[in-house]
Every structure is written in structure tokens, then in C-alpha cells.
Amino acid sequence: MAFPWDGIIFASGLMRLNDYQLRRATRGMASPMLSKTKLMNPFLIHNFWKRVGGIDATMLNFETMMHYGQANVLIYPEGVPGIGKGFNRRYQLQRLSTSALRLSIKYKTDIIPFATVNAEYINPFSYSIDWVNELVQKIGVPFLPLGPTLLLALLQPWMFYFAFPAKLIFVRGRRVKPYEMVNKPFEALSQEEIIVLRDKIHSQMQVELNRAVANYGTKPYHWGEFLRTVVQNWRKIPYFMPFAWPFIFIEHERRYQELQAKLRRFGGDTPEDMAQRQAAQEDVHGNEEESLMAMVKTAAKTIARNPEVLLFYVPIVGWIPTLIKGYQKE
């Protein structure tokens, strides 16, 4: 019942562990609703999910990725019902999609399950009611969390992206090879046989999930560790505090657009153009490690260049750009 920070952390963590080599990491597939719904793009940054490498979860995209094999594929087989099941049904594995299972058999590809423990404490005590979710889905919102943060979101829309500092634990499960669990060609499998196999894998994953929760789910918040991390990285305090995230995201977007403009301007193959492109990229990356004072100055510049960011902090009024056009920029 929260914004999918757990998926973002997991995918970016795999990229970091694999030295940002996409072939060894993953590309995530997500419901097309994420890309199409303005509110589901963090702080209304246009086309966010596709720009960070996400792919709409359609069968055509899925099969294309399996065919070319340029990266591992990260999927959430429960789909939207998985993130919308609520605190009341936490750790109850929802029905798995059969699409991943079918393509695993067709392309003889392994499935490596990962369980995320404590993710429900990113937005704790937010419950799910089916008829409420069905209602909000008509306006493009996948679910509506009924909990403490909902009252804040009614006043300030950016609270949809708020996150409590839960200690997320990613537990790797047993490798599954569905193509070795059948005794006939993929084309000869019936829908009933696929469902039986899916339910068998579902049961195995639920057992492993229960074990992961028993081992790692007793203490969702490690406040001592969190505070030590904040103190040790005090220059990056704004990154730890959700209240600063609107500034950070929107300033990052401004720099991104600025970089793209420079890359287009120096798009030639001359040594001068290549040097200018390299300098532009180094300038952007060099600004990522800033002092706290520098970030305060950056926030002031962000307000000067994008005064609309202040609307995120004005109760009720903050909904105006969301309902009209948001911060969509090509």
C-alpha cells in the first residue's frame, strides 16, 4: 500500500552490485498504469519510469526481452493486487500471473524468487478495501491506502511518495526451473496444466516467504542503525528526509534536462564536441556529492527556477498542478 520504493531500491541495488552492467543486473517490468497515471510518476516528473529503464508489462514486451536476452527481467508476478493487498493481508502471496511461467517454459529460463521483508512498513497500517480500490481505479489510481498517511495526502499530494525508514530485507529463494517440471513441449501444455504448475510454485514461494518473515520480520525499524547512518552521512541529511525529496527530485530533473540540451548542442563527432559532452556529464555527476550548505543553496536556486515546487508544501493548493497538468516537461 505504498509507492514502490522497495522495487526501486531492489533494482538499483542489483545494478550497483553488478557495477552497473545491465546484462548482469535487471530491467524491471511494471504495470502500464505506472507510466500512464500522472500521480504514479514521482513528484509528477514526466515519463519517469521509462526514462529510468522500466518497461510496460505487456506480453509483447515480455517476449521481446526474453528473445533478445539483453538483461535479466525483473517482474512482480502478483501484479497490482500484490502491492494493493493492504496491511491486513501482508505476506499473503496473491495469485501469480501465468505469463512469466509460460515464457520460462518456452525459453527454458530459470525463475529466481526474492522475498521483500518489512516493505509494508514503508507505509504502515494502511489497509485495503476492494470496493474502494475498484472505485479509484476508474480514475487511473491502482489502489487507495486507508491509513494514517491518507489524511496527510488529502492536504498535500506529495505525501503519496512519503516513506518511513523501514529496514528492507531481500531474501533470495530457491531457483525454480518450470521447464524441468513438465514432460511435454510448451505448445502441448493445456491451460489447466499451467495452472496446476503455477499453484505448485505458488505454494513453494509462500513457504519460503513465511520462513523469511519469521527470520527477518520481527523488527521492521532499526532506529539505532538509522540514526547512526544519518550522523555518519550528515552531509546527505536531505536524502534521508522525505520532506526534502520534492526539491531533490525536481532539481535532478532540471539538471537532467540541462544535460540533454548540452548533449544535443554538441552532438557532432569532432574532438571538441566529444570533449564538451564529456565535460557536461562530469559536471552533472560531480554535483551529486554536495555539502549540506551547497544543497541549501541548490534548494534556493530550485525555488528561483521552479517556484511551483513550493506548491507541494501548501495544503490543498498543492493539488492544483496535479489536477491540471503537473510538471510535465518534454
Image (cartoon, grey):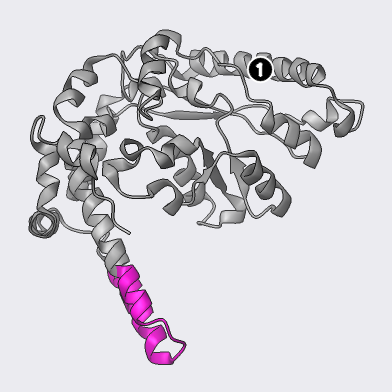
**Relative to 69, residue 209 above or below:** above
Is residue 208 visible in the rendered image? The answer is yes
Is residue 220 visible in the rendered image? The answer is no
Query: In the image, residue 267 lies at what x, y percent?
Result: 41, 81
Classify 10 Å Cα crowding around label 1: few (below 14), some (14-19), many (20 and above): some
Q: Which residue is mark 1?
A: 202
Query: In the image, residue 157 lies at what x, y percent?
Result: 20, 32
Residue 270 inside the magenta-drawn segment: yes
Q: Residue at x 18, y 42 (%)?
A: 321
Left or right, 94 with reference to 265: right
Left or right, 109 with reference to 189: left
Of 116 and 316, which appears nearest the observer? Answer: 316
Q: Residue at x 31, y 22 (%)?
A: 123
The residue range painted magenta reads 259-283
Which image quarter: residue 152? top left
Of 135 and 188, which appears nearest the observer? Answer: 135
